[in-house]
Image: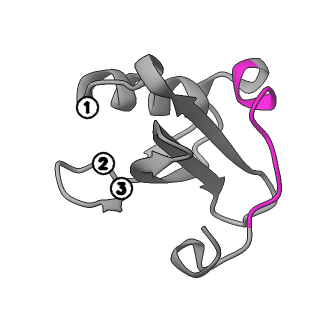
């Protein structure tokens, strides 16, 4: 299920002023709780996904902190880069 509200999909500026966009999906897969944090820049030249399973799930404040780190920390963001297909709702 896509998580809407609580300003969770509000774009955040990176160090160079580029905007980063985010979407969150949460649900169950293979009997485990699953949280997917999708992200991409304005041009969609960098896209990525963080998947958290089971007890790794995060509270909304932790999710927003993770988004800030993804937007501002290039090295951290690199760990999660992966191609995404848009619209996300159709492919994920």
- Residue found farthest to the front: 31
Whether residues under marks 1 and 2 lie with C-beta atoms below 8 angstroms apart, the answer is yes
Which of the 4 quarters of the picture holds residue 3? bottom left
Tag 2: Cα neighbours inside 10 Å, few (<14), some, or many (≥20)? some
Q: Which-is-in-front pick, marks 1 and 2?
A: 1
Q: Percent from the top left, x then y, of residue 51?
A: 60, 36
Picture residue at 57% right of the left edge, 50% below the top: 38
Q: Is residue 8 above or below residue 54?
A: below
Q: Which residues are magenta?
A: 76-84
Q: Which residue is mark 2?
A: 8
- Residue found farthest to the left: 6
Whether residues under marks 3 and 2 lie with C-beta atoms below 8 angstroms apart, the answer is yes
Structural distance between the alpha carbons of marks 3 and 1:
12 Å
Q: Percent from the top left, x then y, of residue 92?
A: 60, 67
13 relative position to 51: left or right: left
Picture residue at 23% right of the left edge, 50% below the top: 7
Q: Which residue is mark 1?
A: 60
């Amino acid at each position: 299920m896509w998580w809407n509200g609580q300003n969770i999909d509000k774009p955040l500026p990176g160090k160079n002023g580029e905007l980063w966009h985010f979407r969150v999906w949460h649900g169950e897969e293979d009997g485990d709780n699953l949280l997917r944090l999708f992200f991409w820049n304005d041009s969609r030249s960098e896209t990525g996904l963080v998947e958290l399973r089971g007890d790794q799930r995060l509270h909304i404040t932790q999710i927003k902190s993770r988004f800030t780190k993804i937007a501002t920390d290039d090295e951290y963001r690199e760990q999660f880069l992966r191609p995404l297909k848009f619209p996300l709702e159709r492919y994920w």
